[in-house]
Amino acid sequence: MVWLLIIILSYFIGSIPWGFLFARRKGIDIRQQGSGNIGAANAARVMGKGWGYVVFLCDFLKGFLAVNLGSLFAAYFGANVVLGGVVAGIACVLGHDYTIWLRFKGGKGIATLAGAALALRPLLFISFGLTWIVVFFIGRYTSLASICGVLALPIAVALFVAKTDSAFSFLLLFSVSMAALAIWRHRSNIVRLLNGTENRFGKK
């Protein structure tokens, strides 16, 4: 019962489409502007960098909040705390990517994933964040930075989490599944990157 509770609560936390809601308050349907994505990068492109930061923070906090609540519920019911956080993080990112409020068409989950990673293990967030920053400032492609960032997650788990750590298998499950989902959600970006037609950050 506790796992169903964690999944449902985390999904609905993740499903709040902040980018869409903020844009709608300004009379904009963000799904019809820029890349059509409801995430922070497109919010910055359509509404300005300030709104992009606001959307990123809100989406980030969804993942952070969901993982902490999932861990708390798991602890309260005597279940594995790390697994509770992992299940919550995955459900939250799925809620963002496939939000029920927009006919299951959401964002790409990077900010929400980053928040979940921080709540699970700061080391995961640091590995993701440093990789994202380096790749972004080299190429100025948010999509490429995001793809490389998520690929850094399972590598970080393999390198820095001891296999004797009881959380190792759960963190590996989280990082591999979330990396796979993020790459799937970026498949159109990957095609444009390969074709040399992907937009750099800062260009309309």
Image (spheres, rainbow, N blue to C red):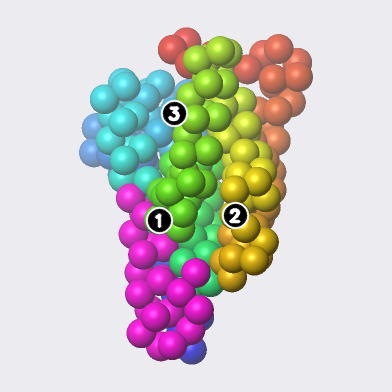
How many residues crowd around disc 3 within 10 Å: few (fewer than 14), some, or many (20 or more)?
many
Q: Is residue 157 above or below residue 36?
A: below
Residue 131 picture location, percent across and down: 55, 29
Nearer to us: label 2 or label 3 = 2
Q: Nearer the viewer, mark 1 or mark 2?
A: 2
Name the residue: 34% across, 59% down: 65
- Which stretch appears magenta? 61-82
Residue 190, x across and y down, in percent: 70, 28
Q: Quick check: 2 left or right of 44?
A: right
Q: Toward the viewer: 47 or 151? A: 151
Tag 2: Cα neighbours inside 10 Å, few (<14), some, or many (≥20)? some
Q: Is residue 38 above or below residue 88?
A: above
Rounded to the nearest angstrom, the CA distance separating label 1 from label 2 is: 15 Å
Mark 1 or 2, nearer chain start: 1
Please say whether residue 166 is visible from this viewpoint: yes
Tag 2: amino acid = Val
Q: Which mark is residue 41?
A: 3
Count of numbered circles in the view:
3
Residue 6 magenta-highlighted: no
**Residue bearing mark 2:** 161
Residue drawn at (62%, 58%) of the image: 162
- Of the residues tagged 3 and 1, which is closer to the observer? 1
**Magenta region, mostly helix, strand or loop?**
helix
Residue 119 - label: 1
Residue, far left:
25
Circles 3 and 1 in contact, beta carbons < 8 Å:
no
Local secondary structure at mark 2 = loop
Q: Is residue 119 above or below residue 34?
A: below
